Image: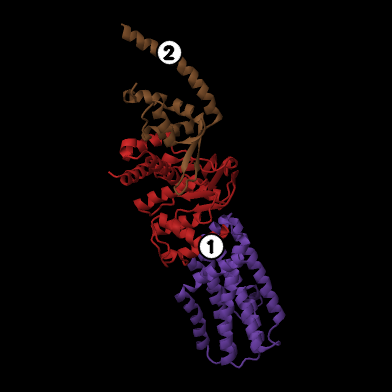
Chain colours: A purple, B brown, C red
Amino acid sequence: MTDVLLGAEMTLRGLLRRRISIAVLVLLPLALYVVSGDTVGRSVRALVFGLTWAVGTVAFFATVAGRELEPRLAMAGWTRRRLRSARTAALLAVALVIALGFWALVAVDQAVRSVPWVGGAMLVTAVVAVAIGVAVGALVPTEMEGTLVLFFLAGLQAVTDPAAGWSVALPFWSSRELTTYAVDGPAAASWAAGLGHAMAVIGAAVMLSRAAGSRRR
Amino acid sequence: MSSDDVPANWLRGVLEPCLLALLADGETYGYELAARLESGGIGPVKGGSLYPALGRLEQDGRVVAEWRPGDGGPGRKYYRLTDAGRASVADNARRWRTFSSAVSEMLDAGVRS
Amino acid sequence: MTDREWLGQLERELQARGVARPQRIEALVETEAFLADAGGPAVDHFGPAAAYAEELVRAIGRRVEPLDDRGRDPVVVVDGVRCSHRGRTVLDGVSFCVRPGEVVALIGANGAGKSTLLRVLAGLDRPDRGSVEVCGPVGYVPQAGGLDPHLRADEHFALFGRGGGLDRDEARRRGRDLASRLGWDASEPTVAGELSGGTRQKLSVAAALVPGPAVLLLDEPYQGMDADGMSRFWELLWDSTEDGVASVVSSHHADVLDRATTVVELEGAP
């Protein structure tokens, strides 16, 4: 247990040192939020898009930073499971903090139908984003390409017409569905579908990450 | 025979067998071996010859060494015979008897001529 | 010349002849004890330090003592390893084994497969054919990288140390000690990504040694180090060997040939 805490602490230390990157990741969604104007739905969705991208990219950065180090730690006696748990714990903690921050902003600044559900949507979004970010880190070779992939996935989600049937195939569909439920209510979206989709995506992302890791070996 | 007269290359030849013979008495450390060699008329053996010889005996497996903690000091390395070393003590004694009597004969013959 | 100076010169002469630190210390202590009993100047009893060092080295040699009888089984076994990369055979039928305290020198031209073999030994790549067995924790030092660019030295030490069951303070102490033996003060807060290449490698080597691995796999690990760093690196390596660590070192440098137990020469297959 202390191993996992130590590993999580180090992941956090490495992340928090990258102050410029962290600032951009937090400020860009805020900028989008501000720029989207007064329509409740639009601004909340812009914020959630920002959250998706911010958390996903942070998770991706953390995975890439540890890529050369983690195999050596495994040789020194760490189990793969502990390394994974440590990194995931740190990332979830960061994701939670960012999500809470944005949630507080929405709660204060907007008149949403349901503040708790907005929080729920953000929380689920954050967890999905961590899973996707880690998977991209395991699959994509360079930082530049990974950032672009994440931006592409999140951005595509933001601009796609939710009525289009194929949009369900996108990994962040659940965040859109849950946000719509929070803002527009049960007539417009289903929380069960959103949650189910989220769990399926998380499961798939975790399996992909592990497969990518063992393929190299 | 004054020990000053012992040529260095003679000492080099007999040093290892003599060390083994001394160690047959029981384990001891470097300086004591040098002192006993000298009081026995074999030497003086400089430290510079002693330790390389002991090192070679260790290499050959005829002697093993062990560090003993000293009182206050860093300790001493004690040497003792292995079974192989013990066997070569008797072997050396026998061969030396034969060899030295041959040498004595040859040298005495030179004096007589 | 005083005895102090003579002893100092003796140590330098032994080091220059490749005697590892534990054996040097033994020789010095024994010599000092003799002088304490005998009295008189060292140079009268032992002659010039250089000549005595030469004699000792010839007699004692640079042999490695096994730690105990039990520790003589090989800890690395390579059997018929074959590797291809994009259709080209990089390694073909490589076999050797390494016992505790032994050093295998991997030599060969660039592209001959040294890095590939080390990666296979480290478990980072799988051979197409043949098998590799490594017993015990491994310290792998790649030619470059292998660190988290955003973490400091102490943080790396804590992570590596934990793998070996060390707590944070003990790991930091060990890591800083290893780094200082390589000539670098690891207490500076610079993150790994901002260190110079040579210093980064020193950190990489020190971190790998912190958890006390049984096997060291080193891929030209002194890249970017200056001459002083390199000689300190080799001394650290030979000292680990004295502690029973089995090492496989790939190198262009002649130093490795002097002291290797086995030399494996890889010729890149045509």
Q: Name which residue type carries label 1.
A: Leu
Identify which residue, C233 or A16, lies in the foreground: C233
Number of numbered callouts drawn: 2
Q: Quadrant of the C terminus of chain A?
A: bottom right
Please tell me whether mark 1 sits on a helix, a strand or a loop.
helix
Q: At 40% across and 28% down in the image, what residue appears?
A: B39
Q: Which mark is residue C159?
A: 1
Asked if labels 2 and 1 touch by Cβ distance under 8 angstroms, the answer is no
In the image, residue A119 sits, relative to residue C78, either above or below, namely below
The quadrant holding residue A162 is: bottom right
Q: Kindly identify which chain the residue marked by label 1 belongs to.
A: C
Q: Residue A158: x, y in percent?
A: 57, 80
Identify which residue, C114 or C206, lies in the foreground: C206
In the image, residue C52 sits, relative to residue A131, either above or below, namely above
Q: Residue B105: x, y in percent?
A: 39, 10
Q: Residue A126: x, y in percent?
A: 60, 77
Check if mark 1 and mark 2 are on a common chain.
no
Q: Which mark is residue B101?
A: 2
Please tell me whether mark 2 sits on a helix, a strand or a loop.
helix
Task: Judge from the rendering whether residue B47 lies leftward or rightward of residue C70; answer left or right.
Answer: left
